[in-house]
Image: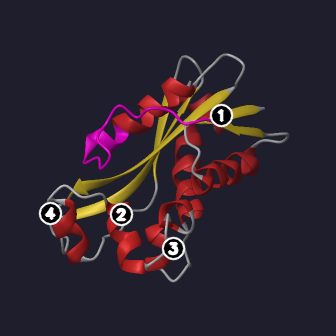
Amino acid sequence: MRVIVGSSNPAKIEGVRIAFQRFFSNVEIEAKNADSGVSDQPFNNETVKGAINRAINVYSKEFDFSVGIEAGLFRLKNTMTGYLDFQVAAIYNGSRITIGFGPGFEYPPAVIKEVVKGKEVGDIMSRITGIERLGEKQGAIGYLTKNTITRSKLTSIAVTMALIPWINPDLYF
């Protein structure tokens, strides 16, 4: 099985690999940056659209599936900051798209204050932690959970959720 990921981010690529290898054998993963077509810091459904766009834009018929990953902030009442971060995965086979979400989590209030002023979460978290390119390593989630959950693991959960219809085709297609 050949899978292409619409990103060169090592944490995202590893998350896709982990998820696909749980369910399929002989999985080959390739990666290529793909345009999300959304803002650098997406909010709400723009996050879903970014994942879909990445999956569609990187797809070619030489692959069984393409995968787009996008993280973004979703406005939710009853949270400390008014926002939760979700990792969204879109899987495309040339005709169908499936979507999955990873667990949501809240950034510190100081981070959200800067994000709503137009800054990117990744830049803010790298500055706060002193870890350059944090999002390509353990990610903000890794830092915030003391590496209990890394960005690769969060990505693998989102991709696993998007794989549900593909591993249960009799129930979905």
| Mark 3 and mark 1: Cα distance apart in space | 25 Å
Mark 4 Cα-neighbour bin, 10 Å: few <14, some 14–19, many ≥20: few
Circle 1: element type: strand
Mark 3 Cα-neighbour bin, 10 Å: few <14, some 14–19, many ≥20: some
Q: Is residue 33 magenta?
A: yes
Circle 3: element type: helix
* Magenta segment boundaries in residue numbering: 32-48
Query: Nearer the N terminus, badge 2 or badge 4?
Result: 4
| Mark 2 and mark 4: Cα distance apart in space | 25 Å
**Residue where numbered disc 2 is placed:** 123
Label total for image: 4
Q: Which color scheme did the rendering employ for the protein?
A: secondary structure
- The spot of residue 171 in percent (x, y) is 57, 32
**Res. 77 mark:** 4
**Res. 4 mark:** 1
Query: Nearer the N terminus, badge 1 or badge 4?
Result: 1
**Residue where numbered disc 3 is placed:** 142
Marks 3 and 4 in Cβ contact (< 8 Å)? no
Q: Which picture quadrant has residue 172?
A: top right
Query: Nearer the N terminus, badge 3 or badge 4?
Result: 4
